Image (cartoon, rainbow, N blue to C red):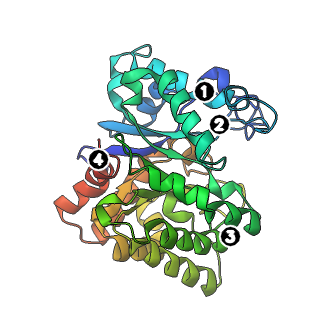
Amino acid sequence: MSPTRAILDSHIHLWPASAADENGHAWMNDPDFILSKQHILSDYTTASSPCPPAGVIYVETDRRLQDPSSAPLETWAAETIKELQFLRTIVEGEYGAEASNLLQGIVAWAPVNQGPKVFQQWLDVAEKTTGPRTWERVKGFRFLLQAIRDRAEFEDLVLSDDFIAILRSFSHRDKKFTFDVGIDQCSGGTWQLESFTKVLEKLYDAVPEDKRTTLVLNHMCKPEYTSTSSDPFSRWKNCIETFASYPRVYMKLSGAFSELSKDASPVDTADPKELATRIQPWTDVVFDAFGPQRIMFGSDWPVCNVKGPKEEGSWPVWTNVVEEVLTRRNCTEQEKERVWSGTAKEAYAL
């Protein structure tokens, strides 16, 4: 049942061997962890070989940061600069022409928590680091908000005038940017989603539709798929419908394998019909709210391998699940094309 149409994978992660440890990523503190090794585009093309994508969008990988109060930006954000240098080598052909052509868009890290002055400084550093060819492929930024687990700290940031000003500036530049929103009901709490609905009110207030910054929600905001209570689902649903009420907000159909198991064990089936059934209450909400026109496919590779039903063979399983979801929704061929590639091309202005 593998899809035969062209795929643009809107959410993948990469890193070289030099960054595959806790020095490059603080979360890689276990050398035996499945992700604690090199993951480059040749590995991705092998994993996705049953249905090779026509293009991918790279999303930043939460590189290790030092204390920003004690050193210049180039020092405390040194690993994120190395991340940009790595992406430049791909675009400029050091990994081959196929890899360069495949990497069609980049969602880079940015210090949106440090105020407009530091953010502008980062833009200057990033553009200089990447060079014109790679900078052209930088389509947006992400800062992992889900990692902020204290509600007061979270709201102090996202509802601040500085944060709103930075996000608004994304659509007021000669080169416009999107912002990928990483918020997480399952690990962070439903309050992260509820707080972010207030962000949209402030961000879009009195701003004409054509001047509004494009936001891309990651992983359906990581629902609590295994919860036995109706309250988390109801609150999640209310937030999703609120997000969807703003036309400049898009949703990634991705990330489910990480949340479908209650413990550290992998998902217990690779049957796409069964997996589609498990997530159907949530996918129905997302499709009812956003419609195929604002939903995009993302694999979350290689994170999809962590609890994926076939470990490093989990990429094609997820594509088959998505195909099953689209079939159950009775999507037309045009609507399927939107989810597989068209929505991402629009949202990221590829």
Q: Residues within 10 Å of mark 1 (few under 14, many from 20)?
A: many
Task: Give the number of the disc on residue 35.
Answer: 2
Gap between marks 4 and 3 measured at Cα: 31 Å
Give the residue at x 49% y 64%: 220
Picture coordinates of residue 233 (x, y %)? 56, 80
Which is more foreground, mark 1 or mark 4?
1
Residue annotated with mark 3: 189
Give the residue at x 65% y 58%: 146
Q: Nearer the viewer, residue 334 or 305?
A: 334
Picture coordinates of residue 238 (x, y %)? 50, 81
Q: Is residue 208 above or below residue 60?
A: below
Q: Residues within 10 Å of mark 2 (few under 14, many from 20)?
A: some
Task: Name the N-terminal-most of marks 4 and 3.
Answer: 3
Task: Name the N-terminal-most of marks 2 and 1.
Answer: 2
Gap between marks 2 and 3 measured at Cα: 25 Å
Residue annotated with mark 4: 345
Q: Please, what secondary structure does the residue beneath circle 3 have? A: loop
Gap between marks 1 and 4 measured at Cα: 26 Å
Which is more foreground, mark 2 or mark 3?
3
Residue 250 located left or right of residue 76: left
Q: Please, what secondary structure does the residue beneath circle 4 have? A: helix
Which is more foreground, mark 3 or mark 1?
1
Task: Give the number of the disc on residue 81.
Answer: 1
Q: What amino acid is found at the position of numbered circle 1 in the picture?
A: Ile
Task: Name the N-terminal-most of marks 3 and 1.
Answer: 1
Task: Name the N-terminal-most of marks 2 and 3.
Answer: 2
